[in-house]
Amino acid sequence: MTTQFDVIVVGCGGMGSAAAYHLARRGSRVLALERYNVPHTMGSFHGVNRIIRLAYYEDPSYVPLLRRAYELWRSLQDEAGEQLLYITGSVDASPEEGEVFAGALRSCELHDLEHEVLNAAELAGRFPGYQLPDGHFALLQPEGGYLLSERCVVAHVNGAMNAGAVVHAQEQVLEWTSTPNGVRVTTNRGSYEAEQLVLTAGAWNGALSDELSPLLSPERQVLCWFQPTQPAHFSPDAFPVFNLTVEEGRYYGFPVAGIPGFKVGRYHHFEEMVDPDNFDRDPNDRDEAILRQFTDRYFPAASGPVMSMASCIFTNTPDEHFIIDRSRAHDSVVLVSPCSGHGYKFCSVVGEIVADLVIDGSTRHDTSLFALDRFAGGAAD
Ligand SMILES: Cc1cc2nc3c(=O)[nH]c(=O)nc-3n(C[C@H](O)[C@H](O)[C@H](O)COP(=O)(O)OP(=O)(O)OC[C@H]3O[C@@H](n4cnc5c(N)ncnc54)[C@H](O)[C@@H]3O)c2cc1C
């Protein structure tokens, strides 16, 4: 049987749940299809929480989007009646010329964001959990914090359904084709038609789009939660979230929340590019060792027994900026791949952007950094 919708959203994880929410609230007849459960632990959004921060070292042009993302997260949590956004402050630290500190400072200066610069000793004096090397500088921005990402997916899905969206879990999109009036989508359970299609399938986007496939590299990541030996140093009121470059690499971390442990991860962990349908999801001793080595050295009061570990997937583009654009090959398809390990905080505003593109054909937000055409010469970086 074929059912007609205005728009079908493929994938109901971070971005798809937000897209379904904004589309439905603006009156679209939405079908959102999720191959696993709502929520689940097979994609990119699980593991309790994700960092949100304004001092954006990756590129200052993300800051206006972040301001809007904060507004939308706050209105979502009001609507959901539960706290989704926790403000702890954020620390972005590296040697003075390093990308993390220097880039975060540039964003603050350009966008007039409140901030403080602390050296390693000053940071440890303020937040004793931190033991950074001499010569490191930390930018402290008071509005940083974290989002309860799994709960945010649930809140977006609840809001979407309240606004009339049809959401199916345990339904995998197998293929889609363009039709004279839009698209036809075939799943393991049925077939549906819609005027437009939104691909928000995260690590699986490449399998659903020939345009995205050469541009996306799914990568295995591992998160670890260590039981602090001095818990008071790692509570949310005593420990800001961080991004930190040291000689071992670039790491990020959180205060204790949800799971009784200090949460830490390493960007591009072991640089393992994977097939999201076929890789070793079980964290192992080698995964723990690289995260423990870092924790021992820079957060020694957090380096107690392991409390939990989880694997997760980054979906990287060649320049690590997002792809949010209309397909060049199919007019009725919007391609949405905002990950490269830093996308979650943007879900709320990406949902709004997707609704703009689908309903109005354009968006007031500046998405030029995310255009497909920047890779027109090929994916090689
Ligand atoms: C370990 C880790 C730490 C991170 N830390 C941060 C952070 O601190 N801050 C931050 O901002 N970002 C962070 N990120 C990035 C962020 O989590 C991702 O950018 C974000 O979750 C991507 O959302 P998405 O919707 O593209 O993918 P997902 O959230 O994975 O959603 C994709 C969905 O599509 C579904 N799907 C796939 N194929 C199909 C199909 N054929 N049919 C139906 N459904 C399908 C999947 O099951 C999934 O639910 C982190 C990511 C990881 C892995």
Image (cartoon, helix red, strand yellow):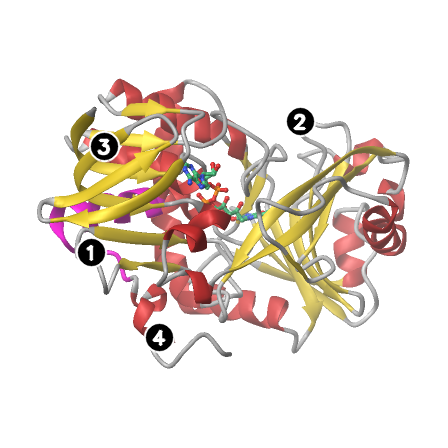
In-image side of 356 versus 230 (left or right): left
Q: Are marks 3 and 4 in contact (CB under 8 Å)?
A: no
For disc 4, the neighbor class at 10 Å (few under 14, some 14 to 19, many from 20) is few
Magenta span: predominant SS is helix
Q: Which residue, given by chain and number where applicable, does mark 2 sit on?
A: 258
Q: Which residue, given by chain and number where applicable, does mark 4 sit on?
A: 374
Q: Amino acid at mark 3?
A: Tyr
Q: Which residues are magenta?
A: 349-366
Q: Mark 4 and mark 1: span between their CA atoms?
A: 20 Å
Query: SS for tag 1?
Result: loop
Q: Nearer the viewer, mark 4 or mark 1?
A: 4
Q: Amino acid at mark 2?
A: Gly
Q: Are marks 2 and 3 in contact (CB under 8 Å)?
A: no
In-image side of 298 versus 149 (left or right): right
In-image side of 355 versus 109 (left or right): left
Q: Earlier in the sequence, mark 2 or mark 1?
A: 2
Does residue 38 lie above or below 90 as drawn?
above
Q: Mark 2 and mark 1: span between their CA atoms?
A: 36 Å
Report the front residue among 181 and 145.
Answer: 181
Q: Are marks 3 and 1 in contact (CB under 8 Å)?
A: no
Q: Mark 2 and mark 3: span between their CA atoms?
A: 38 Å
Locate residue 347: give its quadrant. top left
Q: Nearer the viewer, mark 3 or mark 4?
A: 3
In-image side of 167 versus 119 (left or right): left
Q: Earlier in the sequence, mark 4 or mark 2?
A: 2
Q: Which residue, given by chain and number where applicable, does mark 1 sit on?
A: 364
